[in-house]
Amino acid sequence: MKNTLLVLSTLGCIIWSCSPKTAPTSSQTKPATEQAPDNSIPVSVDMASAEKTYRSVCSGCHELYPTTNYTAAEWGGIVNRMQKKANFSNSDKNLIMAFLSANAKK
Ligand code: HEC
């Protein structure tokens, strides 16, 4: 009886989970593209223009706050709140957040 169970479970493994993976047949290698698609959150941003956006958008109503005052998560909440007051675009927000989180409190 014990043996039968063992055989059954071994068989089960072979049938259900140990089936060979089908290897990808395509031999084509895609050219490595560094650029992210336009509609995605930017993977790499131009930090200089991100900082410029932060400086121009966020100095409109008060002094610029040091980026290290807050963690990236805290900046996320603050920038969302500021966007309600100031109505800057989402693409500006993305740039600003990229700059802030890269330089935020760790
Ligand atoms: C339309 C005016 C306006 C703009 C533009 C603005 N802020 Fe503010 N901000 C305020 C006001 C008013 C306060 C005072 C606190 C409040 O009302 O929330 C404030 C407070 C803050 C504080 C203090 C902390 C806190 O939680 O209140 C931080 C940090 C801050 N802003 C960051 C930013 C950043 C980053 C930007 C750019 C994305 C920005 N602000 C753009 C109006 C603005």
Image (spheres, rainbow, N blue to C red):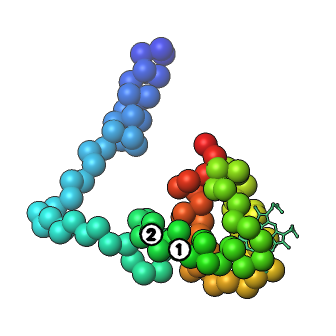
Callout 2: CB less than 8 Å from ligand 1: no
**Camera-nearest residue between 4 and 101:** 101
**Camera-nearest residue between 74 and 32:** 74
**Camera-nearest residue between 79 and 48:** 48
Q: Residues under labels 2 and 1: Cα distance?
A: 6 Å
Which numbered disc covers residue 48? 2
Q: Residue at x 41, y 35 (%)?
A: 12
- SS of the residue under disc 1: helix
Q: Which residue is drawn at 64% across and 56% down?
A: 67
Q: What residue type is labelled 2?
A: Ala
Q: Which residue is drawn at 54% across and 64% down?
A: 98
Q: Quadrant of residue 35?
A: bottom left
- SS of the residue under disc 2: helix
Q: Is residue 4 left or right of residue 83?
A: left
| Cβ atoms at labels 2 and 1 below 8 Å apart | yes
Q: Is residue 78 left or right of residue 33?
A: right
Give residue 42's position: percent from left, percent from top: 46, 70
Give residue 81's position: percent from left, percent from top: 79, 71
User: Does any portion of residue 73 appear in the rendered image?
Assistant: no
- How packed is label 2: few (under 14 Cα within 10 Å), some, or many (20 or more)? few
The residue where tag 1 is placed is 52
